[in-house]
Amino acid sequence: MCNNVREKWGHTIVSSEHGIIEENVNITMHTMMKDYNKDDGNMKIWNTLQTELKCCGVEGSDDWLKVA
């Protein structure tokens, strides 16, 4: 998961069922990336993540190559 998102959400992810929560967040984020151009809500969320948290994907910017 993007390091900046980990820093913001890290306490939640680490505090309870680390693996399950992180996996669910990753799956959700990947799904939202695939629907970026199909859903205005997903587009706004990703635009915010990328601009305010300096996050460029789930694991990194190459994630966008997989959904293009």
Image: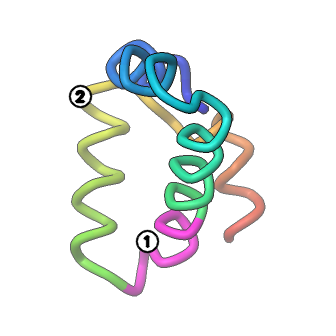
Disc 2 crowd rating (10 Å Cα; few below 14, some 14-19, many 20+) is few
* Disc 2: which residue: 52
The relative height of residue 40 versus residue 14 in the rendered view (above or below) is: below
In the rendered image, the quadrant that contains the C terminus is bottom right
Q: Residues in magenta?
A: 31-38
Residue that sits furthest to the bottom in the current view = 38
Q: Helix or strand or loop: what does disc 1 sit on? A: loop
User: Residue 13: where, in percent of width, then height?
Assistant: 47, 26
Q: Is residue 36 above or below residue 22?
A: below
Amino acid found under the numbered disc labelled 2: Glu
Taking 48 as reference, is 21 left or right?
A: right
**Picture quadrant where residue 37 is located:** bottom left
The structure residue drawn at horizontal position 51% and vertical position 55%, both measured from the top left corner, is 29
Q: Which mark is residue 36?
A: 1
> How has the structure been colored for display?
rainbow
20 left or right of 28 in image: right
Q: Position of residue 1 (x, y in %)?
A: 60, 32
**Position above or below: 11 against 20:** above
Query: Which disc number belongs to residue 55?
Result: none
Q: Is residue 53 left or right of residue 27?
A: left
Residue appearing at x 48%, y 78% in the figure: 35
Question: Residue 10: which quarter of the image?
Answer: top left
Measured as percent of width and height from the top left, residue 8 is found at: 33, 19
Front position in the image: 14 or 2: 14
Q: Type of residue at label 1? A: Tyr
Quarter holding residue 12: top left
Question: Could you tell which of marks 2 and 1 lies nearer the N-terminus?
Answer: 1
Q: Secondary structure at mark 2?
A: helix
